[in-house]
Amino acid sequence: MIYSIYLEKGEDFGYVAHCPSIPGCHSQGQTLDEAIDNIKDAIRGCVEALGSDLLTPPREALVFEVQI
């Protein structure tokens, strides 16, 4: 299954990763690659713990940045 993730620069160090399809599924890493690997592990753990029946199916999403 494919999940969308959201990555942002951490306040103190590295990067923070979120999986919007799974509430509470977050991780972090010193580098982008490490953050991506860690969020994959977090997603696997959430799917295993919650069971796929309890998860919101991933939706295709578009992400845009707007300047105000």
Image (cartoon, rainbow, N blue to C red):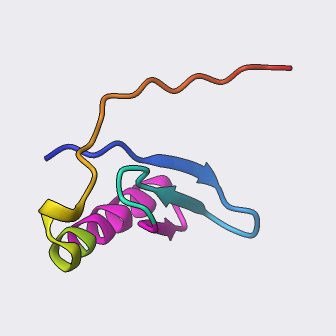
Q: Main secondary structure of the magenta part?
A: helix
Q: Residue 15 placed where, x, y %?
A: 58, 59
Q: Residue 47 placed where, x, y %?
A: 20, 68
Eyeballing the image, is 43 above or below 19? below
- Tell whether 60 sits left or right of 20: left
Eyeballing the image, is 56 above or below 24? above
- Tell whether 14 sits left or right of 54: right
Q: Residue 35 placed where, x, y %?
A: 44, 61
Q: Of residues 66 and 59, which is closer to you in this image?
A: 59
Instruction: State the residue at coordinates (50%, 68%).
Output: 29
Instruction: State the residue at coordinates (47%, 66%).
Output: 26
Number of labels in the image equals 0
Q: Residue furthest bottom?
A: 49
Instruction: State the residue at coordinates (56%, 61%).
Output: 16
Eyeballing the image, is 25 above or below 20? below
Q: Is residue 39 magenta?
A: yes
Q: Is residue 41 magenta?
A: yes
Q: Of residues 26 and 22, which is closer to you in this image?
A: 22
Q: Which residues are magenta?
A: 24-44
